[in-house]
Image (cartoon, coloured by chain):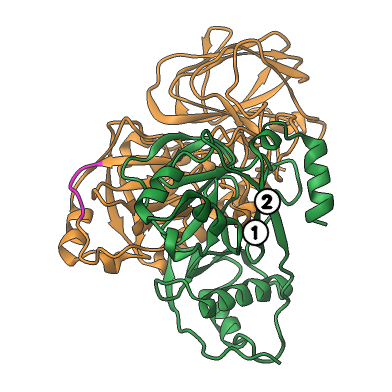
Chain colours: A orange, B green
Amino acid sequence: MESITIEKSGMLATIQDLGREAYLSYGVSIGGAMDKWAFRIGNILVGNDENTAAIEFALMGPKLRFHGDGYITITGADCSPKLNGEPISLWQVLKVEDGDVLSFEQNKDGCYTYVAIAGGIAVSEVLGSKSTSLRAGYGGHEGRVLKKGDRIAVGNDAHCKYLRLKGRKLQNDRIPTYKNKDVIRFIWGPHEDFFGDKSKEVFVSNPYKVSKDSDQMGYRLEGEKLNRINTSDILSYYISPGAIQIPRDGSPILLMPHCGMSGGYTVIGTVIEVDMPFAAQKKPSETIFFEPITVEEATLEFKKQEKWINVLKINNY
Amino acid sequence: MELLEKMVTYKVTRMGERIIILTFPQEISNEIRFQIKFYHDLFHTNPLEGVLQVIPAMNTFSIRYNPLKITEAKILDFIEKHPPYKGKKPVMTSKRVYVPIAFGEDYSLDLNEISKKTGLPKDKVMEKMIKRDFYVYLTGFIAGTPYLGEIDPDIGLPRRNMPRLKVPEGSIAIANNMCTIYTIESPGGWNIIGWTPMKLFNPLNRIPNKANMGDSIHFKPITVEEAENWDENMQEKWDHQWNR
């Protein structure tokens, strides 16, 4: 495939990859895909390196026209994808031909969808990544959302072995249903000592609703407020996506990939790596229950996930 | 060999399964600052397999790692085997970066209030900004925002009660004992004291920040006219004269 034109813009359609981890200490957000699991799977299925630039959008899909033949995979939120008007499946490799149009309709599940393309999106790297930082205005396509009329180039897909891509799909029992997953696991800390046992009990036994004021920096959560027993200020320090900040008003904010990398609010707990994609897929007004687990359990879950992804990669190439 | 007079003890805390944080007492002090810089340099000169990034801040030193490659115990053991200032002296490659600052009605939005609240005449307030070096404790937020300290206690004020929805890029502002430069337009509650036309953050550079943790920033006054006519040429001249 040579390029893609945007015929309709959709919502928050941007170019993303796995972000800018290497630049954290320079005060740069990690950013990248909101759901890094779905993002990685899309790339792996379509024969790319997992950190290849792809298109992300939220809830409302863009309309894309492909120039040249190629292979794509749609992963993440289900927005009823259609190719030339015919319904198509997520989590599997699809062949597209010159002039084909990909469109989306009603959102059925999840919040963020990925369109991975064999060869990836070809834009220049900024600070080691092709991901768009909307907040800072750089990366991706001119540091902004994709608009009607934009034409974006597709990278070299010679390494994607077309014959092997045919019919490739994610096994059924691995396909997530985001709305069914409302328990999000976390590890206490670093500031759990600032909260009394009562607040901690409240936090793990009540539902929290994702507020409409949420964005790619953080999901504001509505529910029981959490009171601190230690009200002293803390100095600005490094914070990470997954951190559950409790500002002075007591309403939690779950930090998302585009959050600032420093902050001065207390963090009661941090969502574990393997559950962050599910948290990111929550839509405004959906609810989350937080369940504490140990570092050892979380590390084991992470190991299991990475091992499985490695097997998927090996089977694919 | 310079030895640290007293070693400040820290607590090890966690942020999820991939980050450990050496947490020093909630205060800003030279001892803590030296120790954090020491650990920062240590990990940069002796990279540990599996440690992805180290991130220094005011009273914390965070270590982000891949738990599939290294354990917390191994990292902490490594730290214990390298106590600050014992053995060899850490590499201190700090530089001083001169940053132009313009004071003026449109640029020093809170100068009147700072003057009123502190009882200091405006020129004295300005003088206190240009008479000292500010240490870069961390570059943070989302685009290398420098957190600088400490300002003269005489001009220390809390943040504004009502944060501004938009603080222009380049604004230089103070709050409590710290000073910052807004590297991108953003909401903010710090007291705006001046403005710089110099870009401190450029994502197109390999190292995006002009000043990084461990460096210091020194403000030098320029006129409003100079600030408004600032361009690449003037920046080049400025860097040639001050930041070589």
Please indicate whether residue B79 sits to the left or right of residue B118 in the image.
right
- For image coordinates 41% across by 59% down, the residue present is B156
Can you name the residue that lies furthest to the left here?
Answer: A198
Q: Amino acid at mark 2?
A: Val
Q: Residues within 10 Å of mark 1 (few under 14, many from 20)?
A: many
Disc 1 target residue:
B217
Q: Amino acid at mark 1?
A: Ile
The chain under label 2 reads B
* Quarter residue B146 falls in: bottom right
Q: Is residue A268 above or below residue A63?
A: below
> Can see residue A19?
yes
SS class, disc 1: strand
The chain under label 1 reads B
In contact (CB < 8 Å): disc 1 and disc 2 = yes
Nearer to the camera, B190 or B49: B190
Please indicate whether residue B191 sits to the left or right of residue B31 in the image.
left
Q: Is residue B36 above or below residue A53?
A: below
- For image coordinates 36% across by 36% down, the residue present is A282
**Coordinates of residue B178 in the picture (x, y in percent):** 48, 59
